[in-house]
């Protein structure tokens, strides 16, 4: 197993834990989790959510997961 596979596995495990934490969280906790991913305020326009910027670390995790 090479380093990339180890990193991918670790990230996948942590993201799954984050998803579980979010599903089980109260509304205030969900706001904290969402705020850590999207540092700027959300805007709801025409029944769609918009955000100007995503946290850089979350963006790279998203890119890695798309490769999986």
Image (cartoon, rainbow, N blue to C red):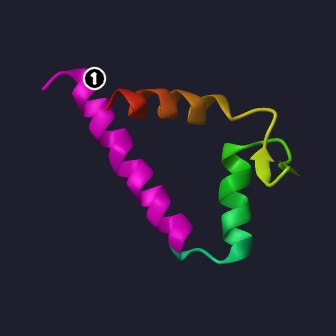
- Does the magenta-highlighted stretch encompass residue 66? no
What is the x, y in percent for residue 54?
A: 70, 35
Q: Main secondary structure of the magenta part?
A: helix
Single out the residue that lies furthest toward the left.
1
- Seen in the picture, residue 26 relative to 47 is either above or below; the reply is below
Single out the residue that lies furthest toward the front.
46
The foreground one among 49 and 64 is: 49
**At 69% from the left edge and 48% from the top edge, which residue is drawn?**
36
Which span of residues is magenta-colored? 1-23
**At 67% from the left edge and 66% from the top edge, which residue is drawn?**
30
- Seen in the picture, residue 17 relative to 38 is either above or below; the reply is below
Q: Residues within 10 Å of mark 1 (few under 14, many from 20)?
A: few
Question: Does residue 20 appear left or right of residue 43 in this picture?
Answer: left
Quadrant of image for the N terminus: top left
Find residue 28 and report its image quarter. bottom right
What is the x, y in percent for residue 49?
A: 77, 49
What is the x, y in percent for residue 32?
A: 71, 60
Quadrant of image for the C terminus: top left
The foreground one among 51 and 25 is: 51
Numbered circles on residues, count: 1
Question: Does residue 59 appear left or right of residue 43 in this picture?
Answer: left
Q: Which residue is mark 1?
A: 4
- Does the magenta-highlighted stretch encompass residue 18? yes
**At 59% from the left edge and 74% from the top edge, which residue is drawn?**
25
Question: Does residue 14 appear left or right of residue 40 in this picture?
Answer: left
SS class, disc 1:
helix
- Seen in the picture, residue 15 relative to 4 is either above or below; the reply is below
**At 73% from the left edge and 43% from the top edge, which residue is drawn?**
38
């Amino acid at each position: 197993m090479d380093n990339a596979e180890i990193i991918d596995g670790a990230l996948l495990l942590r993201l799954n834990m984050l998803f579980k934490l979010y599903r089980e969280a109260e509304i205030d906790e969900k706001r904290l989790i969402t705020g850590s991913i999207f540092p700027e305020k959300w805007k709801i326009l025409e029944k769609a959510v918009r955000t100007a910027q995503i946290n850089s670390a979350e963006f790279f995790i998203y890119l890695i997961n798309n490769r999986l």
